[in-house]
Amino acid sequence: MKNILVTIPVEDRHKEYLERAGAGCRFSYTSPGGVTEEELGQAEIIIGNVKPQMLKDAGELQWIQLNTAGSDNYCAPGILRPGVVLTNASGAYGLAISEYMVGMTFMLQNRFYQYYRNQMNHQWKDQGRVISVCGSVTLSVGMGDIGGEYARKMKALGSYILGVRRTPGEKPEYVDELYTAVELDRLLPRADFVALSLPGGSATRHMMDERRLRLMKPGAFLLNVGRGTAIDTDALCRVLKEGHLGGCGVDVTDPEPLPPDHPLWDAPRMVITPHISGQYHLQETLERIVRIAGENLEKFLEGRVDEMKNVVDFETGYRRR
């Protein structure tokens, strides 16, 4: 009988589902901020996120199922003991975040944010020409669940899709051309929309530095929903101020939260949301996380770890394929 600690905001029906999957186990439910040292010390399985630095007290832990797709903060040496299985919630967020990205695309491309500001100032003012998504070129950097779903939606809207992934692989039918990151410099000048959905870590830090921001097509649009560290924030402020980009929309920043006096708030053609594209704002996201956790729980308890979804490779921070 294993002790299972659940930190995601489950309802009674979710509890019933998880307890069926983990029949015979002892379940306790709390919130990420309410986890105690005693609970961590007893937990053999954790479903949901706990602050990584607290896991040093989880001496009995065998497996942690994250409620986030990003898992890089849990892969650092000293966070989890050797042998602890780490799985993430990749596959839960594609619907919500890709729809957010499409919405942000239209907001930037049609200048909706500028017209809203005009409305607040009671200004009847034409903001000028726009481009169409139909016939555009979209570069999706990161072709996991989120980047892939955004690419699929943009393809349906008539955009030509360039995909960039970490390793070579089979090209999805909704992608017109598929590359690895070594081709990024060559692809950036082609794209009208560049969308980043990347994990954190040294491999992606400042992937979009000032040089690459200036490689983008004049008037192109940049979106970031992965990690704020993928963009050099100071360089982005400079490039936007000079008018090189048509606009930028981000749900993640570096630093995060963004301080009230940070110049990015006032950068021209900039739209910022406070890391809300995922989380549980869409109910289906929570439903998907619970389903992933339940399926993995059954397999873990049966000793079928090799069949679990989204097992993370600690060296890369990505899920194993």
Image (cartoon, rainbow, N blue to C red):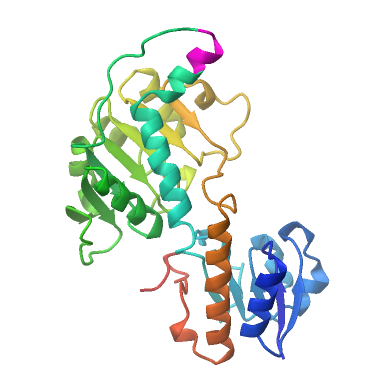
The tally of labels here is 0
Residue extent of the magenta highlight: 117-122
The prevailing secondary structure element of the residues shown in magenta is helix
The answer, for residue 88, to whether it is visible in the render is yes
Quadrant of res 178: bottom left
Residue 223 drawn at (x, y percent): 39, 39
Q: Is residue 223 above or below residue 310?
A: above
Q: Relative to 202, is 283 on the left or the right?
A: right
Q: Is residue 98 above or below residue 13?
A: above
- Residue visible at 44% across and 7% down? 124
Frontmost residue, 302 versus 245:
302
Q: Relative to 164, is 11 on the left or the right?
A: right
Q: Is residue 272 above or below residue 287?
A: above
Q: Relative to 119, is 48 on the left or the right?
A: right
- Residue visible at 27% across and 25% down? 219
- Residue visible at 42% across and 69% down? 319
Quarter of the image that includes the N terminus: bottom right
Quarter of the image that includes the C terminus: bottom left
Magenta-span inclusion, residue 142:
no
Residue 44 drawn at (x, y percent): 69, 81
Magenta-span inclusion, residue 120:
yes
- Residue visible at 55% across and 92% down? 302
